[in-house]
Image (cartoon, rainbow, N blue to C red):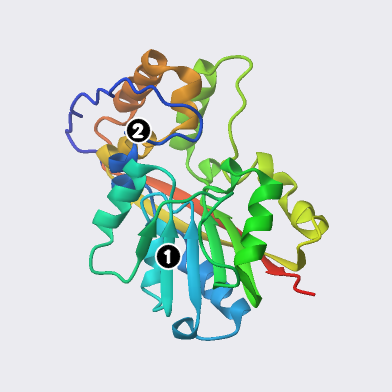
Amino acid sequence: MTAALKLEPLKIKPLAIKHGEFTGLAQDYSAYRPAYAESVLDAILGLLGRPAKALNAADVGAGTGIWTRMLARRGFHSLTAVEPNDDMRTTGARDSRGLPIAWVKGSGEKTGLADDSADLVSMASSFHWVEFGVGTREFHRLLRPRGRFVALWNPRMIEANPLLVEIEAMLNGMMPANAKRVSSGRSGLTDTLNDQLWSCGLFDDVVYLEGRHVARQTPQQYLGAWRSVNDVRVQLGTEKFQAFLDAVARRIDGVDAIETTYLTRAWAARPRKD
């Protein structure tokens, strides 16, 4: 059964942004991006082998803190969120009020944190923006001998819902012929990440984890998640991206809810400390 719903026009603001630049997207990102699978976080803590209250964690490229807040609720001894973008960091700090998270400015290549200061260093949906060699050396520097670097993503399993397959086909029909989507967690960097982490000489154990979970979103929430996207917006340009959002709004107008299956995928690497 569908509701007699008319979506309000969702006009986006023209933003002069580049790949990896999220200024102006933070509000939608924080409000509409889903959380990650709790089971994957359980497994990461299991690999660390000690209770969270005995560990120090740093979440790098924290964005608006979706994953950071999941970590905070597990009760780490200390937790630092490192984020280079002022808009994302400010929004994350606002949305994390009352949680024991220290927010600092820094990047995956230069966190500004001390040597051997972390038992867990994570990058959630952000490691594909980092220069691999520089970033892995930086994380190795931060980690203690029994720690873990974790790169994780939360891609959609569009094949689980015919409606999402249809919308993805609409998008593909509008993308430039030479377009190349930045890693969504199921392509790009993740195709070879296991081998890269093993062969870079900085880690002596790499474990792959995944867990599925389902998010049920209203049409407004579903469109809000699309508005938070950087890669597609940049490659389509403002006018075509607005046309895509308008087409999606027409397609889902009157739908009660959109169910999206997410696949949290994580690579947890232990540092080699000779």
Instruction: Give the side of residue 140 with respect to residue 201, left or right.
Output: left
Task: Determine if residue 217 is in view.
Answer: no
Residue 150 x %, y %: 60, 62
Q: CA distance from mark 2 to mark 1?
A: 27 Å
Instruction: Give the side of residue 23 with respect to residue 172, left or right.
Output: left
Numbered mark located on residue 227 in the image: 2
| Element marked by disc 1 | strand
Say if 218 sits above or below 202 in the image.
above
N-term mark: 2 or 1: 1
Instruction: Give the side of residue 9 with respect to residue 177, left or right.
Output: left
Image quarter where the N terminus lies is top left
Image quarter where the C terminus lies is bottom right
Q: Nearer the viewer, residue 226 or 255?
A: 226
Q: Nearer the viewer, residue 21 or 102?
A: 102
| Classed neighbour count for the residue bearing mark 2: other residues with Cα under 10 Å, few (<14), some (14–19), many (≥20) | many
Question: Which residue sits at x=58%, y=30%?
Answer: 181
| Classed neighbour count for the residue bearing mark 1: other residues with Cα under 10 Å, few (<14), some (14–19), many (≥20) | many
Question: Which residue sits at x=31%, y=31%?
Answer: 252
Residue picked out by circle 1:
80
Question: Which residue sits at x=52%, y=75%?
Answer: 42
Q: Nearer the viewer, residue 269 or 228?
A: 269
Residue 6 x %, y %: 18, 28
Task: Determine if residue 109 is in view.
Answer: yes
- Quarter-of-image position of residue 101: bottom left
Q: Amino acid at mark 1?
A: Thr
Q: Do the residues bearing badges 2 and 1 touch, measured as CB atoms within 8 Å? A: no
Residue 113 x %, y %: 51, 62
| Element marked by disc 2 | helix
Q: Amino acid at mark 2?
A: Arg
Say if 118 sits above or below 190 in the image.
below
